Every structure is written in C-alpha cells, then in structure tokens.
Amino acid sequence: MEITVQGWITIGLFLWVIVGLVFKLVDEIIIGISVPTVLALTGILDAKIAFADFANTTVLFFMSMLVLGAAIFKTGLADYIGGKIIQVIGSDEKRLLIGGGLAAGSISSVMNDTGSTGCLMPIVAAMAKKAKVSVSKVYMPLAFAASLGGTLTLIGTTPHIVASGLLEKSGYQSFSFFEFTPIGLTLFVVGMTYVYFQAPKVLPAYNSDFEKLPATANPDRLKMIIVGLVFLLVVIALATNIMPFHLAAIIGSIAVIVTKCLTVEDAMKSFSMPTLFLVAGIFPLSAALVKTGAAKTIVSSLSGFAIGAHPFIAILIITGITAFLTQLMMNTSLCAIMVPLGILFAESVGLDPRGVVMAIALASSAAFCTPFGTGPNLLVWRPGSYSMRDYFRMGFPVVIMAWLIISTMVYFIYELKLV
C-alpha cells in the first residue's frame, strides 16, 4: 500500500514538529497551532475535528491538575506533606528520586499513570524545594516512574486495556490483571535503577525553577484541610473510576477556587499555554496518521523484514517498531493501530499472538525520548523547563533497555513457555 499525498503531508508535519522543537525554530505555541491548521487546510481532517482537541479531555485534565497543584502549593499543604516525607527519607537528591519514584510507580499500578503524576507533582516539588534540589532534577524521573509503574497491571495504563480488549475481540484470551506484572516489574526495577544513578548526572538544574512555583501564603490550617480533602477526593475518583478522570479534576479545580483556597488570578497563572497548544496539536496529528493510512503503511513495510526470521528476531522487530513510533504519537492511539496488525503479523510468521500483543502493549508505554507519547511526560514538560534534548539524553537508554527486556521476556514466556 503506497502512501498518499495526504499521508506524506502528515508525515511532513510530524517531521516539522520534531525539528521545530529540537532546534527551537519558532515558539512552541506556533508549532502547536500549525498542525491542526495545515490538517484542516489540506482537507486531511475536517476543521471541526482538527481543532476539537483544544477541548480534549486530556487537555482539560492537564489544566485542571495544574490549578489543583497551585492550590496545594499556595495553602502550604505541599510544604507540610513534603516536609514530613523528607523527615523520613532525608533530603538527599537520590533519596528524593527513589521516594518519588516508588510512590509514583505504586500508585500508577492501580490508577491512571497521568493522574498519579499530576497528583504527586506538587508534593515532589515541595520536597525538592525544601531539599534545595531543582525540580528539573525530579519531575522527569517522576514521570518515568509513573509510566513504568503503569506497566505493572492491566489497569495501570490505557494501552493495556485497549490491547486486551482488541485481543479478545479477535478471538483470543484476554490478559489477566497481573499478567503484565513479571515483565512490568522488571522494567520498573531496571528503569528506576538507571534513573537513580543517571538522573543526577544527565538532567539539567535550572535555577529559575522555583520562581515558577506558586508562592506559599501564610499557612492556613482550614484551607489546607479543604484542599487536602479535595485532593483526596480527586485521587479516589481517579483510582475508582467513579467518574471520568477529567471531570474529577475539573470539579477539584473549581472547588479550590470557590472555597477561596486559590484566587482566579493565581489559577490563570498556573495554566501552561505551550502545553495546551502542543497537546491540542499533537492529538489530531495522531488521528491524521491513522486516517491517511501512513502509520499502517510504515508498520506493514517495516514488519515485512520479519518474514522468515527467527522468532526472537521477529519479536525484536515488532517491539522495536512500536517503541520507535510511540516516541512520536500518543501511546493509546499507537496501540490501537498496532494490535490488529500485530495479530496478523503473529499469525503470518507463526508467533503466539498473545505474546506479540503483550510486547506491543508494553512497548507503547516506552515513550521516554520525547514528551509526546505519554501523559506523564507531557504533564512535566513545561513545569520542568525541559527541552527535547533533555528527554532524548535521559530517555534513550531507557527505551533501549525496555525494548530488549520486553522482547527477551516475551520470547521466553510466550514462545518457549518457560514461565
């Protein structure tokens, strides 16, 4: 299947986003708004669809969590909680990394990884501030830990649920709750070990980080209690799915303003316009890749190299393709594209389809080289003042380790049946 003109335009937009952000050719807001504009002008997507993601549930969630985080800071609650944690684990930078990482990983295994990142950001930032450690040293490790923690169970990250549903729809047994755990736990331990030793060396320390955090007012015990209760209710809503995640965050952000724990002015200051425009631009780009057939054509062409290869090499190829593409598009969209192709791929080369789908689902969460593939990465991007180079330098080794671990363990578990 050849790539159409619209497919090439979409691929060109992909390259434009990457090159524009890496080399900072223009402002990030311009890069973000250019994507839906071009998609609409060229007829790849209807204008209403191209710009619809400015009200996307993920965008609403991001903005609302930033408001809630500002309230946690402003009332002094983050300082209080952070201080108590530091009393237990100490103020050493590596202990902060491990403490925040273990918390994010544990929470993300049973609730949305983006939600756990948003909830922990203000607390981790307060801990960093007390320890005089730049938040740029701890935000990215927090996001990585949340993404890795999400691989531990069926419900830890959306791609797992999508993959299991598509697998069952194709006539195969769906994944059990803990079926991801052996590989996911290995990924988490290896990934966090790397972060522990390398983050202090690799990640930059931006001196202006703390200037971006909301100033803490004189601690008001009543307001701290109110914000704490709101925060707890949002966490419960995220963990139990009693309501959509964005609705819980919106209600929480409204509550802290109505109760005067945060002013409207401070709430507006907490918004990140570059994040808003970039997220709203990247989402329709993923949709365009699917609609034009560009993603399917690329995957089909690359997977052709696996025909006749050793089973382990074939798994390496399909896992590698997924791990590469997830750096450039949202992991849930990629998983929805890759799983049906992966099942056909497995059947054609004689692999266990459940193993291939497992590899695809896990590799979809290996988006560590860019801020685009996962919600946690996007959430910490602007607050951490990170550049594309920062993500690549820190994330590339994690992607390689994840690729090799997933491929090897899937081969032994699903092909050799040794576990």
Image (cartoon, grey):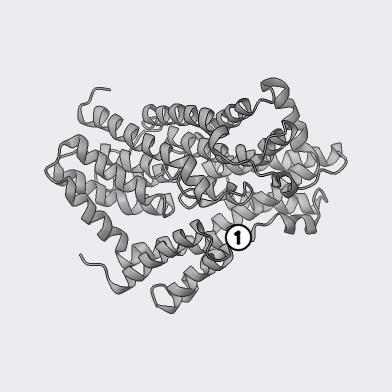
Q: Is residue 35 visible?
A: yes
Residue tagged by mark 1? 274
Up the image or down, 414 lies above or below 367; here it is above
Q: Is residue 324 left or right of residue 368?
A: left
Depth order, front residue of 155/42: 42
Q: Is residue 275 left or right of residue 316?
A: right
The residue that appears at 40% across and 33% down in the rendered structure is 177
Residue found at the far top of this picture = 88
Q: Who's the residue at 62% across and 46% down the image?
A: 384
Asked which quadrant contains residue 171, the reply is: top left
Q: Is residue 376 left or right of residue 131?
A: left
Q: Residue furthest left?
A: 308
Horizontal and vertical percent for residue 170?
25, 48
10 versus 359 height, above or below: below
Q: Is residue 402 above or below residue 381?
A: above
Count all numbered tags in the image, as a single digit: 1
Q: Nearer the viewer, residue 283 or 191?
A: 191
Quadrant in the picture for residue 141: top right
- Amino acid, disc 1: Pro
